[in-house]
Amino acid sequence: MIIQKTEAEVALMKQSAMLVSKTLTEVAKMLKPGVTTLEIDRLCGTFVRDHKAIPSFLNYRGYPFNICASVNDVVVHGFPNNTGLRDGDLVSIDMGVILNGWHGDHAYSFIIGEADEAVLQLVRVTKESLYKGIEKAVANNRVGDIAFAIQDHTERRHGYGVVRELVGHGLGRSLHEDPQVPNYGKRGNGPRLKENIVLAIEPMINMGTKDVYTEDDGWTVRTRDGKPSCHFEHDVCVKRNKALILSDYSIIEAEEKANPNLNTSYYNAVSLAV
Ligand code: MF3
Ligand code: CO
């Protein structure tokens, strides 16, 4: 069942999404070579609790941390650990909160220091694909319109691998509501979008093969070929003419650009899309 939210509920979900954005903004400030993902996990947990919210991933189906920290060939659901981040690492930080009973759940990928052109392009194209999907999140479109837009930009235009095993989702009083929002599919297929449904749209895009496997820890998803993978996620409310993005990358990006340890050179890249 796809649950439409009232305007008041959307306003509360905006608060939840923004708390995640503010948390990821704190992450953007602290990232540098040597910082461990466990340190990031602790900061995020403390920040969220200080804002009268609960980190929602912790204990979700037994997940043992506040955040997912997915480095390089880890696609999603990476466990924070004691290894310092290194120059060239691509790290996605995914965080969920419950504030006033409503979920926020979004993610951002950062590049530490100098990185390969190929990694910079993967990050740019994955972020672009998220916005191309969001453009389709308007009433009377279908889930497949979002899915197709993401797949078309990443797979057809750039030859990347779109992960099939994991999908975006509805969001509300639960972390995962209907509908599922795949990053691959056909235009005009799938459930019809109604005004004031809230979706977590989250492309997971591999530089190489689309194939992934899950480690013995039961969570960590890695690319089969060991090549890097990128993940961005926004919380989006479907509206009649233009989707309303509840989360906010601009505050994260401001700190990302101000942090000399983070690579934002892909912002200036001329699109290599063909
Ligand atoms: N953004 C991911 C999702 O929506 C994160 C879930 S991690 C988990 O599924 F630990 F909560 F499962
Ligand atoms: Co999600």
Image (cartoon, rainbow, N blue to C red):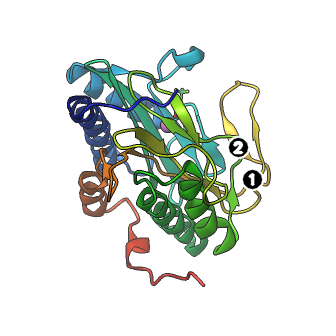
Left or right of 261? Residue 191 is right
**Does 197 sit left or right of 49 as displayed?**
right
Closer to us: 150 or 38: 150
Q: Residues within 10 Å of mark 1 (few under 14, many from 20)?
A: some
Relative depth, front residue between 179 and 117: 179
Q: Does the residue labelled 1 lie within 8 Å of ligand 1?
A: no
**Residue 246 spot, x, y in % from top left:** 29, 44
Evaluate whether residue 81 shows in this view: no
Q: Residues under labels 2 and 1: Cα distance? A: 7 Å
Total residue callouts: 2
Q: Name the residue under label 1.
A: 226
Task: Give the residue pinned by disc 2.
Answer: 222
- At x 40%, y 54%, the residue is 138
Front residue of 2 and 146: 2
Q: What element carries label 1?
A: loop
Residue visible at 62% across and 56% down?
Answer: 205
Say which quarter of the image contains residue 261: bottom left
Q: In this view, does 9 lie above or below 190?
A: above
Q: Relative to residue 124, is residue 213 depicted above or below?
A: above
Q: Position of residue 94 (x, y in %)?
A: 46, 39
- Identify the element where label 2 is drawn: strand
Residue 253 seen by the camera: yes
What kind of residue is marked 2?
Arg
Estimate the x, y position of residue 208 in percent, counting from the top left.
Answer: 73, 62
Q: Mark 2 touching mark 1, by CB under 8 A?
A: yes
